[in-house]
Image: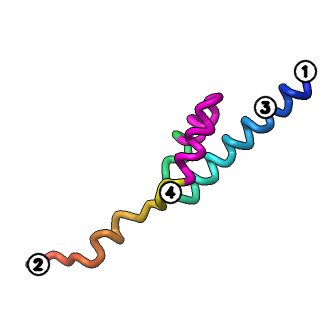
């Protein structure tokens, strides 16, 4: 029984680490997604959600092509 609990805890923290890693790579709030990744059973939903979210671009790149006319 303890082996099962240890296995589940290892999987739980591995998924939380993946949530942290994908949030960091894609530019989303790392703390928020890491905390959500630590919630049991909800962490799989957060992980899959992060897999399909697009990578965020900096705000400056959106306005780079638009110059103010004065």
Choose between 40 and 28: the one closer to the eye.
40
Q: Is residue 56 left or right of residue 11?
A: left
First along the sequence among labels 2 and 3:
3
**In 3D space, how far apart are the residues under numbered discs 4 and 3 (Cα atoms)?**
27 Å
Do tag 4 and tag 1 residues touch (Cβ < 8 Å)? no
Do tag 4 and tag 3 residues touch (Cβ < 8 Å)? no
Residue displayed at 50% across by 57% down: 27
Q: Nearer the viewer, mark 4 or mark 2?
A: 4
**In 3D space, how far apart are the residues under numbered discs 3 and 1 (Cα atoms)?**
13 Å
First along the sequence among labels 4 and 1:
1
- The residues colored magenta run 33-51
**In 3D space, how far apart are the residues under numbered discs 4 and 1 (Cα atoms)?**
39 Å
Mark linked to residue 27: 4
- Give the crowd class for mark 3: few <14, some 14-19, many >=20 residues within 10 Å: few
Q: List the residue tagged with mark 2.
A: 69
Q: Position of residue 37 (x, y in %)?
A: 61, 38
């Amino acid at each position: 029984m303890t082996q099962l609990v240890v296995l589940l805890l290892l999987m739980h923290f591995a998924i939380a680490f993946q949530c942290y890693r994908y949030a960091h790579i894609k530019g989303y709030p790392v703390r928020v997604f890491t905390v959500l990744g630590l919630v049991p059973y909800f962490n799989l939903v957060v992980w899959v959600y992060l897999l399909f979210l697009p990578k965020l671009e900096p705000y400056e790149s959106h306005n780079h092509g638009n110059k103010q006319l004065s």
